[in-house]
Amino acid sequence: MIKFEHTIFALPFAFLGAIMGNLVEEGTVPSLMEWIWITLAMVGARSSAMALNRAIDSEIDGRNPRTKTRAIPAKLLKRGEVYLFILISLALLFVSAYQLNALSVKLLPLAVFFLVIYSYTKRFTYLCHIVLGVTIAIAPLGGWVGATGTLSPEAFLLFIGVLFWTAGFDVIYATQDAEYDKTHGLYSIPSSFGIANGLMTARWLHVASFIAFVSLGIVSGMGWIYYLGVFISGAIMVYEHSLVKPHDLSKLDVAFFTMNGVLSVVMFIFSVGDLLI
């Protein structure tokens, strides 16, 4: 039920937020215990978010030919088992936040709100992609706060970059369900405005993401290694869009899973390399 390929989108950015935050704010890398609690918080947040999505959407998933084999509609898991798993995952998130710092605890209700609300937004707004972007972008923001106990303009630029990147690839992913969503009263940009317009919107969201990452480098005083990573990531986004056409979605899985997983790792490696060298 919990897909590793989805987790790899957010985890490198959470670690990047922690490293960048500590180096910007304190000039050091996070301690071993901070690494452990940030990682456990991410495990709790990501696991609860995925499980909540599957539980909340189980009836919708059961009616959609593409998703009817998921764990709950396929009766591989009982609903009670999933809710128990959610409670355990949220408990892990709460304990981890309390072990980090006061600001992590204060912002925890906001994070949990977005973890829960995202799965409902497709029922009433095509801006559900932006809400998912906020939810995933809380990962680097959470890493930053978890390591430093503070927030800064750099943290919000990292947040914005991840937000628009996530929203863009979620619009691409939603193209495969555009017709189903339209006929079943569900909202997405592709179902509301058409697949071609949806893909164009995704392009502009990724342009905004690229600008945010460049701006982060400028504000943070990053060097050429960071910018090389940003431009490689930009090239990955361009390639991702070249794989998906309005009338040919056959390479969508490669564009969604492979390319975005590679991008998050590239941003982490080049950013941390620039910070440490």
Image (tube, rainbow, N blue to C red):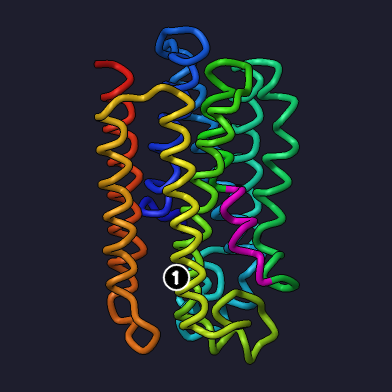
Query: In x, y percent, where is residue 142?
Result: 57, 31
Q: Is residue 132 magenta?
A: yes
> Who is closer to the viewer here, 239 or 31?
239
Which residue has dot 1 on it?
172
Magenta segment range?
A: 126-135
Outermost residue to the top:
27
Identify the residue shown where x is 71% and y is 24%.
Answer: 105
Query: In x, y percent, where is residue 83?
Result: 65, 53
Classify mark 1: residues with Cα within 10 Å, few (<14), some (14-19) or many (20+): many
Query: In x, y percent, where is residue 26?
Result: 49, 8
* The C terminus, quarter of image: top left
Judge whether 239 appears above or below 159 on screen.
below
- Would residue 63 be visible to someone looking at this image? no
Q: Is residue 86 magenta?
A: no
> Who is closer to the viewer here, 260 or 156?
156
Query: In x, y percent, where is residue 238?
Result: 31, 62
Identify the residue shown where x is 25% and y is 38%.
Answer: 228
Judge whether 80 appears above or below 157 on screen.
below
- Would residue 84 be visible to someone looking at this image? yes
Q: Main secondary structure of the magenta part?
A: helix
Identify the residue shown where x is 43% and y is 40%.
Answer: 213
Task: Tell me the amino acid under the disc marked 1.
Answer: Ile
Q: Is residue 263 left or right of residue 7?
A: left
Identify the residue shown where x is 57% and y is 80%.
Answer: 62
